[in-house]
Image: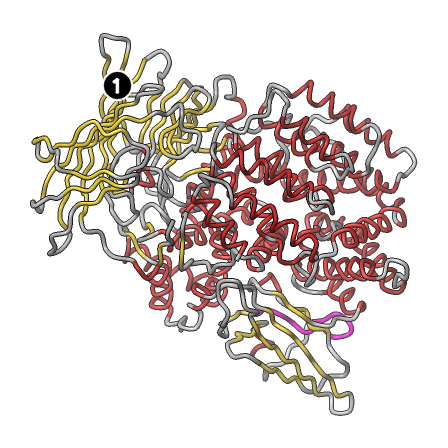
């Protein structure tokens, strides 16, 4: 396969302004008749080249006349046409039941549904399947009335009827022009939850949530979240919903989280269904976030869409930023910010360090599905956030308003977005644009010096972006860097003659930036990168004491958390390097800091919950040049053990302080449950007296999944003998609930036990395991490969081989999911030589496979380069 390049963009040769589609649904033989009005775009004689894959072509007519002069290949249908305006009617046949890729039209648990982003529409009919061809759609669906009472598509239902043979039909019309990737069709027999939302201008919108039969009670949180999102977008961005109906359908078989099809979102049921018993606080949180995300796409994605797929971050980075702001407003801002940053540090930095490194606007793509990445999404959101920081909330809003007034109804580029931000505010973003074209994790090295005699303090910020696999030469970036200087009492130092100090922000643009402050009594403590104001790494040689000061006194809660993480990281890396000669002074100051955090728990439980958690193995990995797996893993455990045992009384107090109240998903209770389960896990790890009684009591009494899963995780991590028995009980109780069973599978796959590679095959032969179901695959193989450190990285390579074996099986079932779970193998660069070789060996094995999907070819070949 050949890569497409961003620089090769050409406007389409033809445009389509209207499509009329008829679907005669049949499990193996669905007929699709699409009639489109085409116009030639510009002066040229080029043929019409339509995209299409896995389609059985039945007939083609132009302006009602049958056509036989066409050329068909695996990916295209080419027609020589003289007319400039014409109507093309194409009938194709497709097989939804055989479609395990879950792209195009497929079957999920007895219902038909579609997934067209990025390039799935071409598996439904021959079309100009590219986001810059915007058309109006009329869609008529025919199917058996008893089995498929609900038949949905985008827009408004305008007609319906019945046929003599037991089938019925429904006609939908979408008044908005849209690209084919936003097309959706669903047919099935669902339970339906309805509600209304009245917009700020007084229009009443019908809200409809379609779920599996019997799951109605689990839909309320999703629907409430939708209403919150609709109100929030009006308040914060002045954006109102534009159709009379908004539908969401939950399905069990879905490659992604959810899809923002115009007026008809299709969701992975994981991001819809929740009740106290079966869903955790995190599930409730994620549902609200994803419902918000897809809703916000209605403006940032649907009304203004992408010109080509290289511009994906135009809609995704912006919409992730919007959903992050929404979540922050709905719960704890600092906790949310920490979550966002953890994703960047665990996964995005790892992507930058791998062969898959790419800028948020990629330059070259073989399979577009491979670019729905943490870089495009999450770093993309950080880039939007930096603009928000540079322009201020009001300036950002002006930029958004201009963006919509300029581009509503169009397919545009990232440059268009930045230009609107710049034109609305007159802030010069020319250097800032490099964030779109430059890949990699920038580093800012901070050094300082203080002259006690003169009271003069210099602090230098030096930026540098190390080369990445895709790009050797890097330029200086425009980096908003928030910070403050603390005096020895912990007060923020102000000095009107130093504008960066008053603004608490430096805009780094050149390689080195120096600030000088005079008249100081003592060397200050720089508290750096407040609120993670840029997606970068910061290097400064903090003393232990300085870190403790920041934890206690910084005005920025994010910085306080970050300092706690630095202190833990330092202890862990130290111990990993010299396990036999621990730095007692360092460990003492860390333990003292933790003592202090217990006090924070009373006033800011959300912050304390985050501060009492150690950095993950993935985060720690990004802090070193070469990962020493066992040493790092055991050092992390030892430090945790030290905190658990030394402070076991405090953990016990913290545990018992958390009142057990009937489950509600509200911020205070969520924070309290987090502290309770964190304490439980430390108590169990310390083997504290009564800890297993406490644990068993919590398991027996919990009225909610958060506390129940808290027990299982603590028992798993603490390697309690009761673990297996609890898991058995859990399985018996939840076998019928696929989403809960996924948690059970994941807990097994995460177990750091020497016999994990004996247990995994048992899991995969479990009667509820299926390679066809992406959630199940992710919960077993994904959890193992991403999070089972010792198992996956077993020195004999057995973990790598195990993953590779399953990737090869998955290749022919669902390439998109296969290409996602291969990610940990592609990140071999930072491991020791032996592991690098073993990982590359498995990649080479995969590369040798016949019939490898484009998705895997792209990732494997890049990784082996
Ligand atoms: N459904 C995916 C998302 O919303 C792709 N658009 O991010
Ligand atoms: Zn999205």
What is the image's colouring? secondary structure
Name which quarter of the figure residue 499 lies in: bottom right
Q: Nearer the viewer, residue 617 or 188?
A: 617
Q: Nearer the viewer, residue 646 or 89?
A: 89
Ligand 1 within 8 Å of the CB at mark 1: no
What element does badge 1 sit on? strand
Residue 406: x percent and y percent? 27, 58
Horizontally, residue 2 falls left or right of residue 388, namely left
Residue 143: x percent and y percent? 30, 17
Q: Quadrant of ligand 2?
A: top left
| Residue at (76, 66) in percent of width and height | 547
Task: Look at the picture and state if 726 lies above or below 593.
Answer: above
Name the residue at the right extreme: 689
Residue 266: x percent and y percent? 42, 33
Camera sees residue 333: no
Question: What span is colored magenta in the figure?
Answer: 481-491
Horizontally, residue 313 falls left or right of residue 494, namely left
Residue 443: x percent and y percent? 60, 69
* Residue located beneath label 1 in the image: 169
Is residue 387 one of those drawn in magenta? no
Name which quarter of the figure residue 578 lies in: bottom right
Camera sees residue 682: yes
Mark 1 burial class by Cα count in 10 Å: few <14, some 14-19, many 20+: many
| Residue at (50, 30) in percent of width and height | 269
Name which quarter of the figure residue 828 lies in: bottom right
Is residue 483 one of those drawn in magenta? yes
């Amino acid at each position: 396969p050949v890569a497409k390049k961003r620089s090769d963009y050409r406007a389409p040769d033809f445009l389509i302004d209207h499509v009329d589609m008829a679907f005669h649904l049949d499990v193996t033989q669905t007929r699709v008749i699409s009639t489109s009005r085409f116009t030639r775009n510009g002066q040229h004689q080029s043929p019409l080249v339509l995209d299409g894959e896995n389609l059985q072509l039945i007939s083609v007519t132009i302006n009602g006349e049958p056509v036989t002069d066409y050329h068909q290949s695996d990916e295209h249908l080419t027609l020589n046409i003289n007319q400039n305006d014409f109507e093309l009617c194409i009938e194709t046949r497709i097989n939804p039941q055989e479609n395990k890729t879950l792209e195009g039209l497929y079957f999920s648990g007895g219902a038909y549904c579609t997934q067209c982003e990025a390039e799935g529409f071409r598996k439904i009919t021959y079309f100009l399947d590219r986001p810059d061809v915007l058309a109006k759609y009329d869609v008529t669906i025919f199917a058996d009335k008893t089995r498929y009472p609900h038949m949905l598509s985008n827009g408004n239902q305008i007609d319906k009827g019945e046929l003599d043979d037991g089938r019925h039909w429904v006609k939908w019309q979408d008044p908005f022009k849209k690209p084919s990737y936003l097309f959706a069709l669903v047919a099935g027999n669902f339970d339906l939850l309805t509600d209304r939302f009245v917009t700020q201008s007084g229009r009443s919108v019908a809200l409809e949530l379609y779920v599996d039969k019997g799951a109605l009670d689990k839909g309320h949180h999703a629907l409430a979240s939708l209403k919150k999102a609709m109100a929030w977008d009006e308040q914060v961005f002045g954006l109102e919903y534009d159709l009379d109906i908004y539908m969401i359908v939950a399905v069990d078989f879905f490659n992604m989280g959810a899809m923002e099809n115009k007026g008809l979102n299709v969701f992975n049921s994981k991001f819809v269904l929740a009740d106290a018993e079966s869903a955790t606080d995190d599930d409730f949180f994620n549902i609200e976030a994803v419902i918000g995300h897809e809703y916000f796409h209605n403006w940032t994605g649907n009304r203004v869409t992408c010109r080509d797929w290289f511009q994906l971050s135009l809609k995704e980075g912006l919409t992730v930023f919007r959903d992050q702001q929404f979540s922050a407003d709905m719960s704890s801002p600092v906790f949310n910010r920490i979550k966002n940053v953890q994703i960047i540090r665990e996964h995005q930095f790892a992507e930058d360090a791998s062969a898959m490194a790419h800028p948020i606007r990629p330059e070259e793509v073989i399979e577009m599905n491979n670019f729905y990445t943490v870089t495009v999404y999450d770093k993309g959101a950080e880039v939007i956030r930096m603009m928000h920081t540079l322009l201020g909330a009001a300036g950002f809003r002006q930029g958004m308003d201009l963006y919509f007034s300029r581009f509503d109804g169009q397919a545009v580029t990232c440059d268009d977005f930045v230009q609107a931000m710049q034109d609305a505010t007159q802030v010069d973003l020319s250097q800032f644009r490099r964030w779109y074209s430059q890949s990699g994790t920038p580093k800012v090295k901070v050094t300082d010096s203080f002259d006690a005699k003169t009271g003069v303090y210099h602090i230098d910020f030096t930026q540098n972006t190390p080369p990445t696999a895709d790009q050797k030469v890097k330029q200086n970036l425009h980096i908003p860097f928030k910070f403050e200087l603390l005096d020895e009492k912990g007060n923020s130092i102000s000095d009107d003659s130093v504008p960066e100090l008053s603004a608490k922000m430096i805009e780094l643009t050149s390689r080195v930036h120096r600030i000088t402050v005079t008249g100081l009594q003592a060397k200050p403590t720089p508290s750096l990168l407040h609120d993670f104001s840029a997606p970068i790494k910061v290097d400064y040689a903090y003393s232990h004491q300085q870190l403790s000061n920041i934890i206690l006194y910084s005005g920025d809660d994010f910085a306080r958390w970050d300092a706690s993480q630095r202190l833990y990281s330092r202890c862990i890396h130290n111990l990993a390097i010299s396990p036999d000669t621990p730095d007692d002074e360092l460990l003492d100051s860390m333990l003292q800091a933790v003592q202090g955090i217990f006090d924070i728990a009373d006033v800011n439980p959300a912050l304390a919950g985050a501060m009492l958690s150690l950095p993950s193995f993935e985060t720690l990995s990004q802090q070193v040049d070469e990962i020493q797996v066992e040493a790092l893993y055991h050092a992390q455990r030892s430090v945790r053990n030290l905190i658990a045992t030394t402070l076991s009384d405090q953990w016990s107090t913290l545990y018992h302080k958390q009142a057990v109240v009937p489950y509600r998903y509200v911020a205070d209770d969520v924070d309290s449950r987090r502290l309770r389960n964190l304490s439980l896990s430390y108590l169990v790890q310390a083997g504290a007296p009564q800890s297993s009684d406490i644990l068993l009591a919590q398991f027996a009494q919990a009225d909610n999944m958060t506390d129940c899963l808290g027990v299982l995780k603590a028992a798993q991590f603490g390697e309690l003998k009761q673990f297996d028995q609890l898991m058995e009980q859990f399985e018996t109780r939840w076998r019928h609930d696929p989403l809960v069973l996924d948690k059970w599978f994941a807990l097994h796959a995460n177990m750091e036990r020497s016999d994990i590679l004996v247990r995994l095959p048992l899991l995969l032969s479990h009667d509820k395991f299926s390679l066809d179901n992406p959630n199940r695959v992710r919960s077993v193989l994904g959890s193992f490969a991403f999070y089972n450190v010792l198992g996956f990285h077993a020195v004999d390579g057995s973990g790598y081989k195990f993953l590779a074996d399953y990737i090869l099986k998955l290749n022919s079932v669902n390439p998109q999911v296969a290409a996602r779970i291969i990610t940990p193998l592609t990140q071999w660069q930072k491991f020791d030589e032996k592991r690098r070789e073993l990982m590359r060996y498995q990649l080479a094995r995969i590369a040798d496979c016949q019939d490898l999907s484009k998705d895997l070819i792209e990732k494997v070949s890049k990784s082996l380069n």
